[in-house]
Image (tube, rainbow, N blue to C red):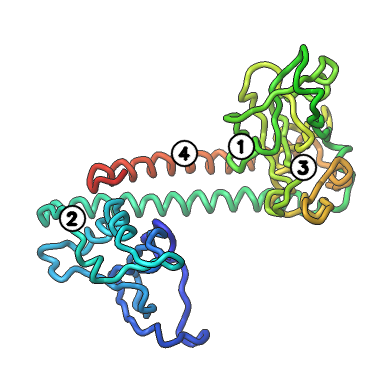
Amino acid sequence: MDTDDLKIHRWGDVGDGYLGPAFHRRFRAGQILYGSRRTYLRKVAVADFDGVCANTTFVLETTDPDRLAPGFLPFVMTSEPFHAFAIRESKGSVNPYVNWSDIAQYEFDLPRLDEQKRIADLLWSLKRHLLRVEAARHAASALVMQLRAENFQRSRGGVRADEVFEITIGRQRAPQHESGDYVVPYLRSANVTPAGIDVSDVKSMNFTPVEQTKFRLAAGDVLVSEASASQSSVGMPAVWKAEMDGPVCFQNTLLRYRAVDGRSLPGFVEQYCRWAFESGEFLYAASGTNIRHIGVRGATAMRLEPTPIAEQEAFVESTGVASRMVDRLGSELDTLRLLWVSLRADLFGDR
């Protein structure tokens, strides 16, 4: 069971391995499963198949469907007041647990049966729509990744990356650059996130006019995290969309990829960097033990097949359609999640 997720996504089969004597509690489709250990993990799920679980998982159902609607109970048990009660009643420090006798004492407002059913129908409809939109967004994301892979998968042949892109590493931070006549904002690896460029915490340092010419960002530049102690973060890319006015430069924790006139398009640069990150090619090009560095040498030595501008335009257009779909579905998901939170706050006192 996953935190704050009413659906069970993973399970094993009897016979896969040793179950142990704790797995003796049977459940049936439609019943509610509640993880009684580490209640702060908020694990409540509705089974959609028959199975068995360990005795640390409580199996619940309404004793009187004419008084408590089966579809209403899961939302009672996923409300903030219920979780707060369960955490407060938990015992132990290393592996806190709650007893059924404690849970059984929980009190909640019980609307009329017809109102319970209306609330349950509304919330389940919203939950199902959320799952459909999540699945559609996942499929659209997979399509974009497939298009990138099909275009760049031969990229260890061909020409060097610096024959197609302008690749520059940022200026090193140093005490002598902390003040001066030309202090401007600069971006660092912390500003590059999976969601794009985050400008909520931007530092500043002195870049002379000559340095600004070299290190100033232009809309469409792709910033790549040059190094990380986490292999999953090496080469993370994000596109600079001029989120801040005025000159903005970048530090040497970032590589800047820029299109070269007649050789590459900005959209093609972005798709290449995203592919190199997703496929692990940036990590493959990096060196180091504790902290993996791509460096200018590693970045420029990467290779890709030269692609005519006309083919780049077609490729960028096809990936752009799918990427815009991902963004639209992501926006819809954000709206639905806000609606979900708002409804639950009104109905169950969630905060």
Q: Which badge, 3 or 2, is on the more N-terminal residue?
A: 2
- The mark closer to the camera, 2 or 4, is 2
Q: Is residue 272 left or right of residue 168?
A: left
| Amino acid marked by disc 4 | Ser
Relative image position of residue 335 (x, y in whole percent): 40, 39
For disc 3, the marked residue is: 226
| Amino acid marked by disc 3 | Glu
Q: Is residue 91 left or right of residue 283?
A: left
Q: Quadrant of the N terminus?
A: bottom left
Relative image position of residue 337 (x, y in whole percent): 39, 44
Residue lying furthest top: 181
| Amino acid marked by disc 2 | Phe
For disc 2, the marked residue is: 108
Q: Dot 3: within a 10 Å radius of its alpha carbon, few (fewer than 14), some, or many (20 or more) residues? A: many
The image quadrant of residue 88 is bottom left
Q: Quadrant of the C terminus?
A: top left
